[in-house]
Image (cartoon, rainbow, N blue to C red):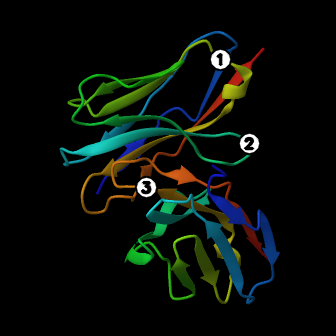
Amino acid sequence: DAGVIQSPRHEVTEMGQEVTLRCKPISGHDYLFWYRQTMMRGLELLIYFNNNVPIDDSGMPEDRFSAKMPNASFSTLKIQPSEPRDSAVYFCASSPSQASPLHFGNGTRLTVT
Amino acid sequence: AQTVTQSQPEMSVQEAETVTLSCTYDTSENNYYLFWYKQPPSRQMILVIRQEAYKQQNATENRFSVNFQKAAKSFSLKISDSQLGDTAMYFCAFMKQGTSWGKLQFGAGTQVVVTP
């Protein structure tokens, strides 16, 4: 079991650029989550999917953020255009069912200059 | 809304000693889960232990155990026989059952430093 795989590990970009973060969940896990971690706000849920369908996106900060899950083994979180306040660590997590805990990836550290 | 409070920003413990991290939460829910996650310098969030609110028995995972007091809304973590590899940020987290499942509410974290 390779765990949840996120790429890239680090991303540095300039304000106004588009950023795409990628996630491969653990095989067989039907739930996928995107979390953001900042010093000011701690860990926050952005969005989660069940069987590739977005269930709760109430945590997505604004329209500049979008997430997709085209199939069971891949998800993206896109920020367009990026802003310095988007700088954070973005985590992807997956879970096989509602009764199971979340398994997190190693996160992507995003820096927007 | 649920809130999770970790009142200890940092704890230091010597190898082989025991340390207890405190966590309190506020909720009107009756059915929920509580978790402790560990975040070492590698940044990965690693599940340490999990407790279902309907279970009275405290969860235990090797050197890690919890003291779950539902009425007091308290969920402390005890690390026994501390090891250098236990150095990490520890987060307490709350999750409702049913709707809004998956929305982990995290505390601010406690940095644990294990010294030789």
Q: Residue at x 74, y 45 (%)?
A: B42
Residue B103 image position (x, y, % from top left): 39, 59
Q: Is disc 2 surrounded by few (<14), some (14 to 19) or many (20+) residues within 10 Å?
A: few
| Distance between mark 3 and mark 1 Cα atoms | 36 Å
Chain letter of mark 3 equals: A
Residue B93 image position (x, y, % from top left): 43, 45
Residue for badge 2 = B41
Q: Amino acid at mark 3?
A: Pro
Q: Is residue A36 left or right of residue B24?
A: right
Q: Amino acid at mark 1?
A: Val
- Of the two numbered discs 1 and 2 on the same chain, state the one appearing first in sequence: 1
Chain letter of mark 1 equals: B
SS at badge 2:
loop
Q: Residue at x 41, y 27 (%)?
A: B76
> Is label 3 in contact with label 1 (beta carbons under 8 Å)?
no
Name above or below for residue B111 compared with residue A47. Answer: above
Q: Is residue B85 left or right of residue B31?
A: right
Residue A83 image position (x, y, % from top left): 68, 82
Quadrant assignment for the C terminus of chain A: bottom right
Residue for badge 3 = A96
Pointers 2 and 3 within a single chain: no
The answer to whether one can see residue B107 in this image is yes
The disc label shown at residue A20, or none: none
Q: Amino acid at mark 2?
A: Pro
Mark 2 vs mark 3: in front: 3
Name above or below for residue B1 compared with residue A71. Answer: above
Residue for badge 1 = B13
Residue A35 image position (x, y, % from top left): 54, 63
